Image (tube, rainbow, N blue to C red):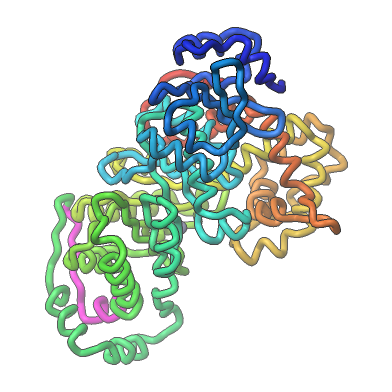
Amino acid sequence: MAYDLSAMLEKISVNMSADKIKELTKKDGEFSSVYPYSVHETDGTILFMIKGQQNKKLVAVGGLSSIFQKLEGTVIHKEELRVKECPCNIENSKVIQKHFSFTRPIPLKSSPTTIGLGDRLGSATPGHIKTIKKYNAKPVLAQQSIRELNLTGRCYGGVLSDAVWAVFQEGYTGGFGADGDHLKSREEVTMALESGFTMITLDCSEHINDISGKSNEVVEKIYNEIDPQVRAKLEKEFLNKEFTLKGGLNLSFAKKDLAVNAVIYQKAVDFAIGIYNDLLKPISDNVDFEISIDETSTPTDPLAHYFVSAQLINAGVEIANVAPRFCGEFQKAIDYIGDKDQFEREFKDHVQIAEHFGYKLSIHSGSDKFSLYPIIGRETGLKVHVKTAGTSWLEAIKTIIQADPALYREIHSFALENLDKARKYYIVGADTNNIPDINSLADEQLKDLMCLDDARQVIHITFGLILQAKDGKGNFVFKDRIDKCLHENEDLYSCLLQEHIGKHLGTLGATSAGPCDM
Ligand code: ZN
């Protein structure tokens, strides 16, 4: 498994070409630990990535170029040849990004089908790329919310760097996005932009007023407390008007509708316009702006969706995606819970509104919503953004179940013991009574656990606690062993990801070609 750089150096000569190295990677021997798609050449220096015992390394061959000088690492001489062995860290990823444009994230607003592939561990992305290469869709490879950053102990620089290395390793030149997901403040948006992210998902939930349980009179009273100038503007724009969309959807706001929507959403609208004007407008060509109003207790009805978007568009906000809250339950890591017919009816209205304003609908918590994907793909004509994240963590768990069942058993028991802490962050059913006692299961039966909704959710929502758990000496209880297991079994991990993420794209209707690529 381990590579021997000095043995490799024997085979490398001063005038060796990138093509020659690519050829050597195909055969068994000293170069078999080189990632075949990672061989790139620039400015007379050949670069490739290699699988070390603990982690991946970058090797640069040919020492006269500026990229060779700028990369951090250890120089090894072989006569007149200079070779540098470099860590795949944040600093070196920035050097790579300067020299290889395909490793820089881009906005994807003009790409019809896009999929967010959150990678909480930072090691799933090569499998994601192998999947996406086979489908007609563009990936958002770096996608993390602040909540996920805190739960995994990562930073945006590290999340992006992991994606950059995966793109370089797989030689993926198709273009990818980087999503600062569920950002709630000016400071968080600024941090994501400064880290090089090209998509901002603004979570407006803290500015959305919950009026459940409030009487019409109370709502009207709150409405009348809104600045008279703002009310006058809203009434001019919406009151007693008919909005007929191309698909036939007819929307009109009676006084009560306007009051309800203004009370619920007006602060969120103002917040989004403020963030856009101050931070995103000057760079709007280079960034995708997604408005998320999905984290609310009640579904977004078509009037509400129209009310929010019309004001943003009128204020000159360039919107890439909007994430409404749909009816039913989009629980983590399991299929949709709810009335599919109702979903389809309401979804069609949301599609019309999105088409009217010219943006994509964004489907949050899209992991494993297989029963909805045919509807979503068909109704949007595949002009849609879908976000997944936790489901790739579960594919990592499936890898561990197969490769190191004893480690899984420890993780499983820990997750059950700590479930109540995780429920603070995620609302899921996860009834532990439906999970069989792990001691009654043989190793070969463990993989069946990942087909049980309740077990999936327990492992899904405890990921942060599992990854951050430390022993009395301050060492990670699981994280290092998880990383090691996934590194050593990366082909299995990649294959499981390709199957599972491929199933998402397949049921959505994105065209595919070919089976799993190791
Ligand atoms: Zn969301």
Give, as a single range, the part of the protein colored magenta.
248-261
Q: Residue placed at 76% from the left, 51% from the top?
A: 476
User: Vertical placement of 200 versus 43: above or below?
Assistant: below
Relative depth, front residue between 508 and 126: 126
Q: Residue placed at 31% from the left, 78% from the top?
A: 260
Can residue 447 be seen at all in this image of the molecule? no
Residue 82 image-quadrant placement: top right
Residue 79 rendering spot, x and y as whole percentages: 59, 15
Can residue 118 be seen at all in this image of the molecule? yes
User: Vertical placement of 285 versus 55: above or below?
Assistant: below
Give the side of residue 435 with respect to residue 370, left or right. right
Q: Residue placed at 60% from the left, 29% from the top?
A: 75
Residue 504 rendering spot, x and y as whole percentages: 47, 36
Whether the magenta-drawn stretch holds residue 249 is answered as yes
Residue 432 image-quadrant placement: bottom right
Give the side of residue 389 with respect to residue 285, left or right. right
Residue 103 rendering spot, x and y as whole percentages: 41, 36
> Which residue ends up furthest to the front in the rendered image?
80
State which quarter of the image contains the N terminus: top right
State which quarter of the image contains the C terminus: top right
Relative depth, front residue between 106 and 80: 80
Q: Taking the image as four quarters, which one is ligand 1 found in?
A: bottom left
